[in-house]
Image (tube, helix red, strand yellow):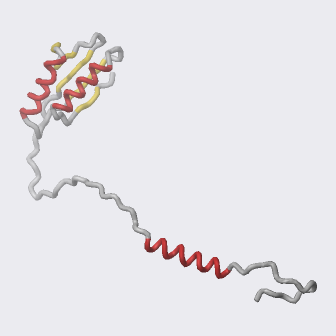
Amino acid sequence: MAFSSNSSGGAMADINVTPLVDVMLVLLIIFMVTAPIASYPIEVNLPQRSTQPPPPTDPPPPVKLRIDASGQVFWNNSPYPLSAIAGMMRETVQRDPTNQPQLEIDVNPDADYGILAKVLAHAKTADMKKIGFVQN
């Protein structure tokens, strides 16, 4: 019992917490071991190893697309309406889908952003893979 023989003869007021701490540590370890580990699978498409590398091919010349301040779109320095650009992009990709030319986009700082957004949407729809921005 928790009695002591001190000078006043009363009961000891301190509780021994060591067994309580031991039980709590054991329970903590049990919960840590038995708790399921949360894992989320992430699908990653890795390239497959090939014993025969593809033959080297020269890249086609880049396509220069320019948007001026008035919103006019130029395809290789020739003006075209925005609706014709989508078909030209699809035709360019269909020539050789594995060896596409790079689309170099040059935009005037004063041009409407909506025109650029439409051009990029057309490029995505046409499945153009190589898109770059020309910085002047």
Quadrant hosting residue 107: top left
Name the foreground residue: 29 vs 85.
29
Q: Residue 97's x, y, as percent?
A: 10, 37
Q: Which residue is depicted at the point 11% across and 58% down?
A: 51
Q: Residue 18's x, y, as percent?
A: 67, 80
Q: Residue 116's x, y, as percent?
A: 28, 22
Name the foreground residue: 49 vs 125.
125
Using the image, determine if residue 118 lies above or below residue 53: above
Question: In which quadrant will I find the N terminus?
Answer: bottom right
Q: Which residue is depicted at the point 15% across and 31% down?
A: 126
Name the foreground residue: 107 vs 12.
12
Question: In which quadrant will I find the C terminus?
Answer: top left
Quadrant hosting residue 15: bottom right
Q: Is 40 on the left-hand or right-hand side of 128?
A: right
Q: Residue furthest top?
A: 70
Tally the numbered discs.
0
Q: Residue furthest right?
A: 7
Using the image, determine if residue 43 lies above or below residue 37: above
Quadrant hosting residue 94: top left
Name the foreground residue: 92 vs 9.
9
Q: Which residue is depicted at the point 40% across and 68% down?
A: 36
Q: Residue 17's x, y, as percent?
A: 69, 78
Q: Residue furthest left?
A: 95
Q: Is 49 on the left-hand or right-hand side of 106?
A: left
